[in-house]
Image: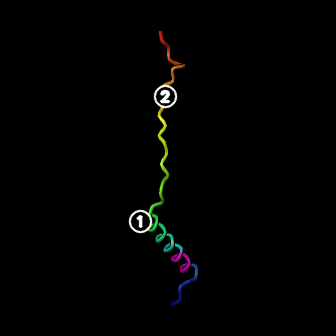
Amino acid sequence: MSRSPFLLLLLLVLGVLAVGLLAIGAFPPAVPPQQVERALPNERFQTGR
């Protein structure tokens, strides 16, 4: 009983994806730090009455 080449290719692609996800999960890429922006109050539309 021989498997179809499509099924073998599909299993190979799924295996490569699983190994890739495991590698990214084990060694995540470094995220560059970003400065946090604070929201400033908008005084233009506030009424001082």
Of 47 and 14, the residue lying toward us: 47
Q: Quadrant of residue 27?
A: bottom left
Of 44 and 8, the residue lying toward us: 44
Mark 2 or 1, nearer chain start:
1
Image position, residue 7 (x, y; %) = 54, 79
Name the residue at 48% across, 31% down. 39
Name the residue at 51% across, 73% down. 16
Instruction: Name the secondary structure under disc 2.
Output: loop
Q: Residue furthest bottom?
A: 1
Which mark, residue 26? 1
Q: To which residue does mark 2 refer? A: 40
Q: Quadrant of residue 25?
A: bottom left
Image position, residue 15 (x, y; %) = 49, 74
Image position, residue 23 (x, y; %) = 45, 68
Q: Up-down: is 10 above or below 1?
A: above
The magenta-colored residue range is: 7-12
Name the residue at 51% across, 76% down. 11
Image position, residue 22 (x, y; %) = 44, 68
Can residue 8 be found in the magenta stretch? yes
